[in-house]
Image (spheres, grey):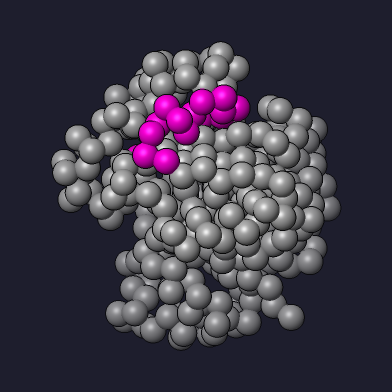
Amino acid sequence: MVRHFLSVTDMNREESEALLDRAAALKAEWYAVGRGVHPGLPMQGRTLALVFEKPSLRTRVAFEAGMTQLGGHPSYLSANDIDMGGRESVPDVARNLSRWVQVIAARVFKHSTVETLARYATVPVINALCDVEHPCQALADMLTLREHFGRLQGLKLAYVGDGNNVCNSLLLLGATLGVNVAVGAPQDYLPDPEIVARAEVLAAESDATITITTSPTEAVTDAHAVYTDVWASMGQEHEAARRRPVFEPYRVDANLMAQAGSAALAMHCLPAHRGEEVSAEIVDGPRSVIFDQAENRLHVQKALVLTLLGV
């Protein structure tokens, strides 16, 4: 049976922890071989199709580099190459790619697009970002937290800013893995209530807590890590001027980090707008693990491809 990864909830706690274990092992192996190719080239002869409606740095390069390091081949397809829903329907794209490649990663605007790809594809489909979730990012974030604290259970992760797709995936995956997640966002930008309700159910099972507040100070108090994202995501640039004054009180700077305590880490999924959602001193400071998160995209995405293919 073909298995897809469209949401972090497509894997239970045991599976998610096993994937993080595999990513950590791949990372150690990659360094052991001098950051070159993995022994045995487990993806040799296999191709990953990268179907991207949105441009990307981390997602694209991490998948491309990861496939190369595993001995496979990435094939990048931009909106100009395919024009899904325009020149060619989403079901037909899925049917065609399934005849040529072994796995598809899709970075799209709408969650319904990855759902349709998965419905018609006969190979695994990975959600590389959509308007509802960013599951690959959340996996990298959890690996980063585990590296720095040696555990996930009982940690407090504070997310401050827009209750967007990144926030959704952190709520769901954090709750699955026993992380206490607190979100501080403006009233009109709180995370989707349905996502919150699902996270609360998962948190009850993992002995974690979910906190949703409009107070950034309440969200970050006693947090092990403080996370933020841009105030206007890709495709929302026309809202940036309207959003800026609403989000000003939610900027992650030295004052807000002080509320979390001296040992709290600073996190961001990038790209970062220094001086807007986060100050430069935080991004480039000693408590930042932002570029660890970025590197870990490589390792979790390799582990994800291998796991879905049963390699």
- Is 228 left, or right, of 122 in this rendering? left
Quadrant hosting residue 152: top right
- Where residue 4 appears, as percent x and y from the top left, is 63, 70
Q: Is residue 186 above or below residue 192?
A: above
Q: Residue at x 34, y 31 (%)?
A: 250
Closest to the observer: 207 or 273? 207
Above or below for 45 versus 250: below
Magenta stretch, residue numbers = 213-230
| Residue furthest to the right | 40
The reply to whether residue 116 is in sight is: yes
Residue 70 counted in the magenta span:
no
Q: Check the picture and name the quadrant holding the C terminus.
A: bottom right
The answer to which of 297 and 10 lies nearer the viewer is 10
Viewport quadrant of the N terminus = bottom right
Q: How many marks?
A: 0
* Residue 229 image position (x, y, % from top left): 40, 39
Residue visible at 55% across and 49% down in the picture: 171
Q: Is residue 103 visible?
A: no
